[in-house]
Image (cartoon, helix red, strand yellow):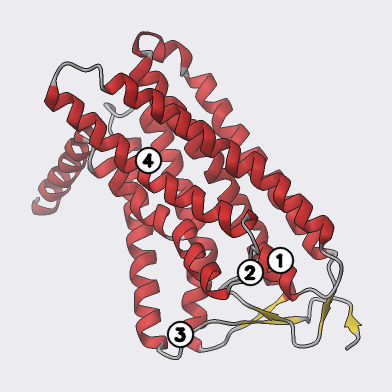
């Protein structure tokens, strides 16, 4: 079948949406609503509470804003497709979604490593914490994460834009991502796969190793705490953090860089849900609602809001 050049009128078909669209629509809508409200609540609380101005809460606010953006790339489009039953998407829209999904996903990979390093310094070197993690350093960390995430997205988007697509142009995914588009292409994707493997190492595997190293050092320090209650509290918090980031990194790495990556439609769907939907949904609970300072700030905000409402 002859290859065709891409135009703004080119249309791709997203595969995989089940027939039970009402149930799927309700589920997607519920997940997206909880994700956005949870993360915006954390962001707002950190901004208004003067006691939550340490580097840790600055990073939590940035993570919350990032997670709102990350979840907003795919979920609203998936919701619209599930409600309308229209799984068609233009090439321009597909490429735009690809850019932002890769940008926010790559930024989150780097950002979680920065947050793990922040916790390492706070727990293992508390006397140097304020000096090491000053406002300028924190701002540089955030800027570096976003810059690398955007550069990564530009590279992948440009490589995908150069591809040629043939025939029906079906995308075996719920949304536009790198591997499904490479599968749909009928041109040589060797360079794109090389880029994907290189990027996965620097933005996926390397940050994951740094996260694991930070938490190993944190746990070894926790074991030296004499207070059993204090040791259990810190260990419980760190273990929940570690579980979420491990799910995020491991599913993303194996999806993009594992054996026969992208060839199993079922695996791609499950992995995509785990690394693109679950972390933004759980991060407010794991990082914030188990935190006594955040819970205290939330109670204060709710109390003040109730008083103003009664007046």
Going 61% across and 56% down the picture, which residue do you hit? 258
Distance (Cα) linking label 4 and label 2: 28 Å
* Residue at the spot of label 4: 242
Verify CB contact (< 8 Å) between mark 4 and mark 2: no
Q: Which residue is mark 1?
A: 95
Of label 2 and label 3, which has the lower sequence position?
3
Q: Nearer the viewer, mark 1 or mark 4?
A: 4
Camera sees residue 54: no
User: Where residue 149 sits in the image (x, y, percent)?
Assistant: 64, 44
Residue at point 63%, 59% (across, down): 259
Quadrant for residue 176, please give it. Answer: bottom right
Q: Label 1, label 3: how many angstroms apart (C-alpha)?
A: 22 Å
The answer for how far apart the CA atoms under marks 2 and 3 are is 18 Å
User: Viewer-nearest of labels 2 and 3?
Assistant: 2
Return the x and y of residue 172 as percentages of the image width and height. Answer: 62, 77
| Element type where label 2 sits in the image | loop
Q: Give the x, y percent position of residue 201.
A: 65, 42
Q: Which of marks 2 and 4 precedes in the sequence?
A: 2
């Amino acid at each position: 079948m002859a290859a065709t050049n891409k135009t703004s009128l080119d249309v791709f078909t997203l595969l995989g949406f089940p027939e039970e669209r009402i149930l799927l629509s309700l589920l997607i809508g519920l997940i997206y609503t909880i994700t956005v409200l949870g993360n915006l609540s954390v962001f707002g609380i950190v901004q208004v509470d003067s006691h939550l101005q340490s580097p840790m809460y600055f990073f939590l606010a940035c993570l919350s804003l990032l997670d709102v953006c990350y979840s907003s790339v795919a979920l609203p489009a998936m919701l619209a497709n599930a409600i309308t039953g229209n799984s068609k998407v233009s090439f321009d829209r597909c490429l735009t979604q690809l850019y932002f999904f890769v940008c926010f996903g790559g930024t989150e990979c780097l950002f979680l490593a920065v947050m793990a390093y922040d916790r390492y310094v706070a727990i293992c070197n508390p006397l140097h914490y304020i000096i090491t993690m000053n406002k300028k350093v924190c701002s540089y960390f955030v800027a570096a994460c976003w810059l690398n995430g955007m550069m990564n997205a530009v590279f992948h988007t440009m490589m995908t834009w150069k591809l040629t697509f043939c025939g029906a142009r079906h995308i075996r995914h719920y949304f536009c991502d790198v591997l499904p588009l490479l599968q749909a292409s009928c041109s040589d994707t060797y360079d794109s796969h090389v880029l994907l493997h290189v990027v996965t190492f620097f933005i996926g595997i390397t940050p994951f190793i740094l996260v694991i190293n930070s938490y190993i050092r944190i746990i070894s320090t926790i074991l030296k705490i004499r207070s059993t209650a204090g040791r259990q509290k810190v260990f419980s918090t760190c273990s929940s953090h570690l579980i979420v980031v491990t799910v995020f990194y491991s599913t993303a790495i194996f999806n993009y860089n594992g054996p026969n990556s992208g060839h199993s439609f079922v695996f791609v769907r499950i992995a995509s849900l785990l690394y693109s939907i679950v972390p933004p949904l759980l991060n407010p609970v794991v990082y914030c609602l188990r935190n006594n300072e955040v819970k205290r700030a939330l109670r204060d905000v709710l109390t003040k809001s109730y008083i103003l409402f009664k007046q």
